[in-house]
Amino acid sequence: PDNPPSPLPPALSPMAIPEELRRYWLPILLAAAGFLFQLLVLPKSFPPSHYDALGIPTFAPVEKVVEAYELLSREWLAETNDRSTVDIIKIRYAYELLTNPVWKRDYDLFGLDHHTDIFERVKEQYQKEHFLKIDLPLLKDSLIHSTGHAFNVITRDSLMSAIAEDYPLLIQV
């Protein structure tokens, strides 16, 4: 009446889930969900870059920025212009930012955009105006703080006069 235990393991049905898959199904599912989230959802949450405003690839050289701006500015003057003034301000701001070598370097390397206050002020000021009434260049207020006097340049004469002084001299290279 009692069946003796079989020395063989019970036969697996063809639809049985392997042990490893049963053990790791939740971490695999969470990893796949995280990957899809990073791939599909996160890129849409970042604001478009200034390169996107001009329709060029990220880190494009200044020549491509100028070409894209000239192409877009020709479209503005055409009769079929359907862009809003705010879009045109964004494009002009991106052009001015990305054609200045120092500002472009800071934006490309660090994502720094020091002139957002000017951009917001101009956007508010000209939001209802026609784009031909916009006072250009947009970043003229900050041109004074441009690259010309950013660093003290050491010339031969300034070095010789500094060496002749009686106090210690520290030169940073």
Image: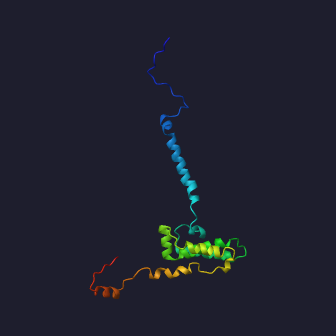
Residue 91 location, quadrant:
bottom right
Horizontal arrangement in the rendering, residue 172 relative to residue 76 (left or right): left
Q: Residue at x 49, y 40 (%)?
A: 24
Residue 71 location, quadrant:
bottom right
Which is more toward the observer, 68 or 164?
164
**Taking the image as drawn, is residue 68 in sight?**
no
Q: Is residue 47 above or below residue 148?
A: above
- The x and y percentages for residue 46 are 56, 61
Q: Residue at x 53, y 76 (%)?
A: 99
- All told, the count of numbered labels is 0
- The x and y percentages for residue 115 are 54, 74
Q: Is residue 37 above or below residue 13?
A: below
> Residue furthest toward the left?
166
> Residue furthest toward the right?
79
- The x and y percentages for residue 76 are 67, 75
Which is more toward the observer, 161 or 67?
161
Which is more toward the observer, 163 or 72?
163
**Taking the image as drawn, is residue 115 in sight?**
yes
The coloring applied to the image is: rainbow
Q: Quadrant of the C terminus?
A: bottom left
Horizontal arrangement in the rendering, residue 14 relative to residue 127 (left or right): left
- The x and y percentages for residue 157 are 34, 88
Horizontal arrangement in the rendering, residue 68 relative to residue 162 (left or right): right
